[in-house]
Amino acid sequence: MSTDSGAAERAPKPLYGSKLRRFTEPEQIGNPKTLAEDHRAVVDGETQYPARVKHVADVDRCFKSGEHNKKIGKEIVKGKWVGMPIYTLTLEERATCPRTCTHWRDCYGNKMNWSVRLRHGPALEHKLEAELEALQAEHPAGFVVRLHVLGDFYSPEYVAKWGRWLVKFPALRVYGYTAWKRWDDIGYLINILNMRPDRWVVRFSDAGGYDGTITVGSVIEAEIAGAIPCPAQTQKSECCATCGLCWSKTDKPIAFQRH
């Protein structure tokens, strides 16, 4: 059996190795897991893995370091928030998302059978505020929260709380994505918070525009659509922490390949 001795040299190498992420294997793209139209999770609007939904009383913390997510990374090394640590928040997909989401059936959460999803509601919001207060004390120079690894903004009141937290915790920065439309009651409030791009940047998924994203099947498709291919997916950057594009001002949408 012959081996290709140059394969290891040709393979893309992580820019920062294990300093920013525990897992450095590339993201698997182009093969989403699509559920049937009559699948329980699709019909009832919930995750495919209900046993992985936890009440906040059953977890040590809501915000997890970005180092545990291979797409995100531990600390920002590029852009306006350089030096700030990243934390993530994961809710239950579909249960907190609009049914108009174009990925209702092929959500990438369908492939994340080990991820813990937090049950949304008042108990979650109470614990989030307590943890944000602790993060403010720990990182007075700034910290970033990625909303949401799974799930979405589930009510106008929840978005409004994030607005109040931006005022209460001056070290807080937020970036992320939402499947709500810009004209929905939830999307409208998100748009208002987007007027503070120094602190808050949430892009509208599959919406296009300078503050949106699109989903494509290939880099060529992204370029034809006039979008910017996600540098992490094209291996031009290691992860969000080494990129910074999504929380930067762009004149085009960012394109993500199906995954």
Image: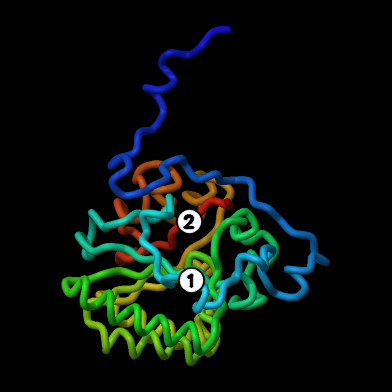
**Lateral position of residue 120 relative to residue 175, left or right:** right
- Amino acid at pointer 2: Ala
Asked whether the viewer can see residue 157, the reply is yes
Whether the residues at callouts 1 and 2 have beta carbons within 8 Å, the answer is: no
State the count of labels: 2
* Residue beneath disc 2: 255
Please name the residue that numbered disc 1 is placed on. 59
Q: Is residue 199 above or below residue 9?
A: below
On screen, residue 206 versus residue 41, left or right, reads left
Left or right of 141 in this view: 64: right
Front-most of residues 18 and 206: 18
Instruction: Kindly indicate the quadrant of the structure image that contains residue 227.
Output: bottom left
Residue at (39%, 56%) from the top-left corner? 72
Label 2 element class = strand
Which is nearer the eye, 185 or 123? 123
* Helix, strand or loop at mark 1: loop
Q: Residue at x 67, y 63 (%)?
A: 49
Pinpoint residue 150: horizontal percent, then vertical percent: 53, 66
Q: On the rendered image, what quadrant is the N terminus found in?
A: top right
Residue 108, given in percent of the width and then of the height, sits at 59, 58
Q: Nearer the viewer, residue 124 or 164?
A: 124
Earlier in the chain: of badge 1 and badge 2, it is 1
Q: What residue sits 21% from the left and 60% below the top? A: 82
Alpha-carbon neighbours of circle 2 within 10 Å: few (<14), some, or many (≥20)?
many
Q: Nearer the viewer, mark 1 or mark 2?
A: 1
Q: Identify residue type, mark 1.
A: Val
